Amino acid sequence: MTEPAPPWKPMATAPHDRPITIQAERWVAFYETMRVETFAGCRWSEGGSVRNPVPYWRRLPPGWSPIGWL
């Protein structure tokens, strides 16, 4: 018997004050498929530095688009 899928919440409601688990997707052109993975411990960063000028999720690798959170 499999466990039910977790109740992912929309990214628009993600808290920016604590670490969260993010479900993200990425298109893999070679296989022509969408890959979905989860990344634990992601924290919001306001950016503002020369190296990271725009806001982003820490621990979410480049190229991945967040689609839900726990």
Image: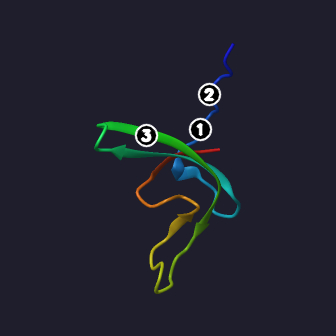
Question: Which of 46 and 12 lies nearest the eye of the viewer?
Answer: 46
Which residue is found at the position 29% from the left and 37% from the top? 32
Residue under label 3: 35
Q: Is residue 62 left or right of residue 29?
A: right
**Which tag is nearer the camera, tag 1 or tag 2?**
2
Query: Which percent across, then down, holds residue 37?
Result: 53, 42
Q: Residues within 10 Å of mark 2 (few under 14, many from 20)?
A: few
CB atoms of marks 3 and 1 within 8 Å: no
**Which tag is nearer the camera, tag 2 or tag 3?**
3
Question: Which of 28 and 47 lies nearest the eye of the viewer?
Answer: 28
For the N terminus, give its image quadrant.
top right
CB atoms of marks 2 and 3 within 8 Å: no
Residue under label 1: 8
Residue under label 2: 5
Which residue is found at the position 45% from the left and 79% from the top? 53
What residue type is disc 2 on? Ala
For marks 2 and 3, the one nearer the N-term is: 2
CB atoms of marks 1 and 2 within 8 Å: yes
Task: Find the distance from the CA under tag 2 to the CA under tag 3.
Answer: 17 Å
Q: Residues within 10 Å of mark 1 (few under 14, many from 20)?
A: few
Which residue is found at the position 34% from the left and 44% from the top? 28
Query: On the image, which quarter does residue 38 sit in?
Result: top right
Question: Which of 44 and 41 lies nearest the eye of the viewer?
Answer: 41
Task: Find the distance from the CA under tag 1 to the CA under tag 2.
Answer: 8 Å
**Which tag is nearer the camera, tag 3 or tag 1?**
3
Query: Which percent across, then down, holds residue 15?
Result: 64, 57
What residue type is disc 3 on? Arg
For marks 3 and 1, the one nearer the N-term is: 1
